[in-house]
Amino acid sequence: MYDLVLKQARVIDPQENLDEVRDIAFRDGNVAAIEKSISASEAIESHDLSGRLIVPGLIDLHTHVYWGGAAIGIEPDGYAKASGLSTLVDAGTAGPGNFTGFLKHVIEPAETRILAFLNLSFPGIFAFSKEVMVGECGDLRLLNPAACLKIASLYPDDIVGIKVRVGLTASAGRGVAPLDIALEVADELGLPVMCHLDNPPPSRLEVVSRLRKGDILTHCFRPFPNAPARMRDGAVREEIIAARERGVIFDIGHGQGSFGFVTAEAMIAADFLPECISSDVHVLSIDGSAQSQLNTMSKFLALGVSLNDVIAASTSGPASAIGRPNLGSLIPGTPGDATVLNLDQGDFEFTDVEGLVRTGNSRLTCEARVLSGRWHSA
């Protein structure tokens, strides 16, 4: 007997190259079977989902959900429920000095799975709000690699990498020094670095030339300056192409100031798609142009990216990036997480961080989540 059967939805699992109408069964918290037909009588609970999409549980690779502990943080479960997310990856809200509080007071009590990049800076992102904005990597005294190594070693099930923010805002013009420290810590741990880049200094070239295979450049479709493509002709920068060739991972990280349609259109025209689409949702961007993971994904549909590629960049792509590939598929035996989506048709407007507007004829919305094999309505 199965705990749950979902019937007759269009199942899209990019990791398995699956895009067909199927039934999915869950048992004991895992995916149990995917078949053309599974009788509802074989399950305690069943739902007919004809006309809907079922995808592996969506993953937002770049969020800030240290709610109550950092000014930047939003409440995780309400956000995840609205966007159909089974996994939130916090992008360095907490550092070595406060990660244990984040773990005990937010990560462990949450209904939604939360994994985290540990911020290189001891206090994490400590001053990010409408009222106060201070980059945590601007003071090199706060960057203690031994403290990072100690905390990341204590919590290997929860910490998936090291986060560093560089740029005029995030590191007060300290150049690549914070990135070099982060890379040393990550190398000792065998984990990736996720690197934020805002306005120079440092330059895009200085940053991406340092990133290794498996490291993540977030805000990868940011507007000028430090954009990955030239604005005058749309050509992808040589250092960006070289970084992809050696295995650097590109993540959108929309946020309040890091996703521009002009850049995105140039990159897509060059067939340079991101491995990961993420929202960078935080206390400011949730009410701005980013809004949510589903809104960010829908922007890529409006830009002409295929539905399957958009789903891959929110499932198998981020799952691979954090070294948890079993979270990005619906293969029997994997964790029983799935997202039930509607692909709404109509006329929809989308806005980037510079106020530019693009229109699309489809939009993704959430109907339900399955978490550990249990049905949760949106």
Image (tube, rainbow, N blue to C red):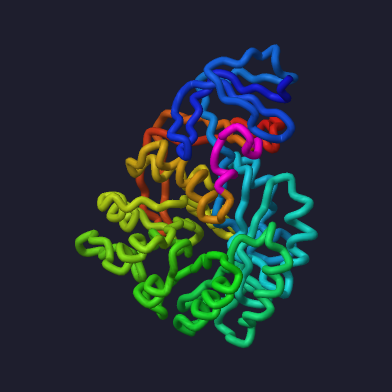
**Residue at point 42%, 28% (across, down):** 345
* Residue 239, quarter of the rendered image: bottom left
Q: Position of residue 116 (x, y in %)?
A: 64, 60
Q: Main secondary structure of the magenta part?
A: loop
Please indicate whether residue 64 sits to the left or right of residue 1 in the image.
left
- Disc tally is 0
Q: Position of residue 100 (x, y in %)?
A: 76, 66
Q: Is residue 265 above or below residue 187?
A: above
* Residue 104, quarter of the rendered image: bottom right
Looking at the rendering, the stretch of residues picked out in magenta corresponds to 325-336
Q: Position of residue 307 (x, y in %)?
A: 41, 36
Does residue 154 appear in this view? yes
Outermost residue to the bottom = 141
As rendered, which of 235 and 255 lies closer to the eye?
235
Magenta residue check for 335: yes
Please indicate whether residue 283 sits to the left or right of residue 295 in the image.
right
As rendered, which of 284 and 120 lies closer to the eye?
120
Q: Position of residue 9 (x, y in %)?
A: 53, 22
| Image quadrant where one finds the N terminus | top right
**Residue at point 60%, 43% (across, down):** 85
| Image quadrant where one finds the C terminus | top right
**Residue at point 74%, 63% (across, down):** 102
Does residue 131 appear in this view? no
Magenta residue check for 300: no
**Residue at point 75%, 56% (across, down):** 106
Q: Is residue 254 above or below residue 239?
A: above
